[in-house]
Image (cartoon, rainbow, N blue to C red):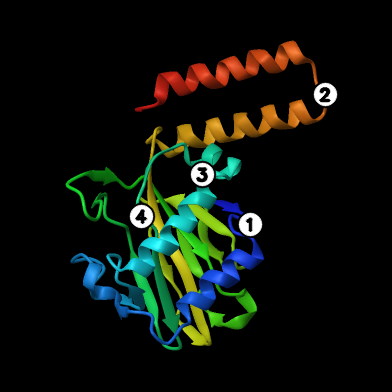
Amino acid sequence: MLIRIPSILSAEQAAQIAARLNDANVPWVDGRITAGFQGEPVKRYQQIDEHSSLARELGEMVLAALERHPRFISAALPARVYPPMFNRYEAGMQFGAHVDGAIRLIPGTTAKMRTDISATLFLAPKNGYDGGELLVEDTYGTHSVKLDAGDLVLYPATSLHRVAPVTRGARLASFFWVQSMVADDAKRALLFDLDNAIQRLGATGADESARTALIGTYHNLLRMWAQA
């Protein structure tokens, strides 16, 4: 399930983070320092040292926005969110086809998390650079994603995906992973569709007893499938 979520950050918030990332004193490092054996040969971008104070500060801003966004909660059903990281692709940089690692060690802890969902939060205006599309493959083909600053895309971490070469300007983004309470993508998709239908029924003043029954069904399915 690939889901686009607009306005996780407001235009002002995205511009604020982008301005911080574009500062000349930002501690950019080679993205390959966090690459596994699969990613190292194809990973060509810069990222902020995830242990830096700037990465932690900006990451907290992103996490706070996620916690307030009902569509993200509905789509991801998050149990854990990896601390957001930040990267930059300049002209000539790209990330070749890969699948994200299944398990991540949460920085500064001994805790590990399963990566059920991959997430990219776009931070640069999409007309400010050429190329840099996120290309995600599934059984329906290849999906090209290039969103406005502040918009988020979620997709299964099991997906083969890549970032096309940037040919002009700079692509800025935050990226992270989610361990969902419902590990199975198909089950998450059913719950997401059901939740959206319930919300639409409420907005249109549909039969309240039927809506209540559907809410009960949603929670009973979540109870059956969730790993809290």
Alpha-carbon span between mark 4 and mark 3: 13 Å
Alpha-carbon span between mark 1 and mark 4: 19 Å
The residue that label 4 is drawn on is 83
Q: Are marks 3 and 1 in contact (CB under 8 Å)?
A: no
Q: Does residue 147 appear in the picture of this structure?
A: no
Q: Nearer the viewer, mark 2 or mark 4?
A: 4
> Where 108 falls versus 195 (above or below)?
below
Local SS, label 4: loop
- Residue 143: x and y in percent read 53, 61
- First reached walking from the N terminus: tag 2 or tag 4: 4
- Amino acid on which the number 2 mark rests in the picture: Gly
Label number found at residue 67 = 3
The residue that label 1 is drawn on is 7
Q: Quadrant of the C terminus?
A: top left
Q: What residue is rendered at 41% in x and 62% in y?
A: 57
- First reached walking from the N terminus: tag 4 or tag 3: 3
- Amino acid on which the number 1 mark rests in the picture: Ser
Alpha-carbon span between mark 3 and mark 1: 13 Å
- Residue 3: x and y in percent read 56, 50
138 left or right of 30? right
